[in-house]
Image: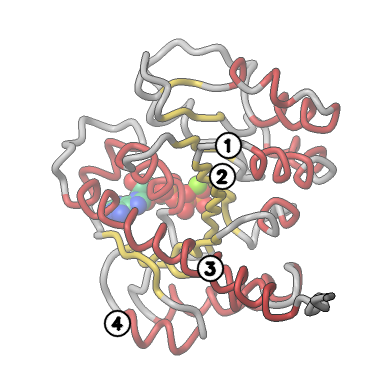
Amino acid sequence: MTLIAIVSAKGSPGASTAALAFTLTWPSPVLLAECDPAGGDLLAGYLARYELPANRGVLPLASAALRGTAEAELAGNLIDLDAPRQQRMALPGLTEPAQSATLDLAWTSLGEFFARMAAQMVIADCGRLSAAHPPWALLAKADLVLLALRPHSLRTVSPAMSAVTAMRRQLPAGFVENSLGLLLIGGGIGGREVSRHLGVPVVASLPWDTATAGALCGDGRGRRRAPLMRRSAAAYESITALIAARRMDSALSRRDTEPLTPVLP
Ligand SMILES: Nc1ncnc2c1ncn2[C@@H]1O[C@H](COP(=O)(O)OP(=O)(O)OP(=O)(O)O)[C@@H](O)[C@H]1O
Ligand SMILES: [Mg+2]
């Protein structure tokens, strides 16, 4: 399994929209997990016109993960975004941000559960790092953390520096160097400059596309061929190629540090 977490810094909207656009356009089976401690957006946004049960989602699944029964309870907590194909599933987020403190206990178990899920890509929308109770233990299990960033101006880029510093402090040594990338949303300061300033590579870019983003938030209808959807689909290649390259690097460095076994006659 591959776990991709999307986070954002203060002043850079677009993390949840990007997570949903990836989920709706990627070519392999995918699960969108709303893990934002500030609450989920899907039920009140993209899925607002459907009558859906409100009792499923990340909170009951997290309790199940703590009890060791997440596998059995997963299907009952998901919504099929592409019914009846079950290729694009969603795990709705918290309905009440106050519940996020309870989840602090469960992020490790949930991250481990996602990591065990075979043949599925999980995209976890983890919300703003400046909010209370970021899901650090889940982020630490990710193959790639994408920091969503609007490179619009210095005012939008500067808060990303404290987000990167917080990640260096909270996540295991070497995590930021190996598993963090930027997801630029909209234009402004050039990607190379932003990347140099933050010391983090740009992994993908999405356009500022108000009509499509509005449709993904439940306002109006979007088009499959709209710029935001096309660029989301294209981001799949760069994101999965980077994850594969990093896995290869870490396998090689593990092999290099393994002790040589003596060959006996
Ligand atoms: N690529 C985009 N182009 C145009 N508008 C966008 C884009 N992405 C997001 N928006 C708009 O910005 C607003 C916030 O988007 P979104 O909910 O994705 O942000 P967020 O980072 O998840 O915010 P929060 O931290 O509150 O969860 C929405 O109105 C959305 O339509
Ligand atoms: Mg959001």
Does the closest atom of ligand 2 sit within 8 Å of the Cβ of label 1?
Answer: no
Q: Residues within 10 Å of mark 3 (few under 14, many from 20)?
A: few
Mark 4 / mark 1, whichever is N-terminal: 1
Kind of residue sitting beneath label 3:
Met
Q: Which mark, by number, is residue 190? A: 4
Asked whether, in this view, residue 206 is left or right of residue 15, the answer is left
Q: Residues within 10 Å of mark 4 (few under 14, many from 20)?
A: few
Which residue position is annotated with label 1?
A: 118
Does the closest atom of ligand 2 sit within 8 Å of the Cβ of label 2?
Answer: no
Mark 3 / mark 1, whichever is N-terminal: 1
Instruction: Spot the residue most to the front.
Output: 265
Q: Identify the residue at image location x=44%, y=66%.
A: 242
Answer above or below: position of 193 versus 93.
below
**Closer mark to the observer between disc 4 and disc 1:** 1
Q: Which mark, by number, is residue 1? A: 2
Answer above or below: position of 163 versus 132.
below
Mark 1 / mark 2, whichever is N-terminal: 2
Asked whether, in this view, residue 50 is left or right of residue 161, the answer is left
**Closer mark to the observer between disc 2 and disc 4:** 2
Which residue position is annotated with label 3?
A: 248
Q: How crowded is mark 2: few (under 14 residues within 10 Å), some or many (20 or more)?
A: few
Q: Identify the residue at image location x=78%, y=79%.
A: 260
**What whole-number distance in Å separates the C-alpha atoms at marks 3 and 2?**
15 Å
For label 4, the SS is: loop
Q: Please say if the residues under marks 1 and 2 sit with CB atoms less than 8 Å apart.
A: yes
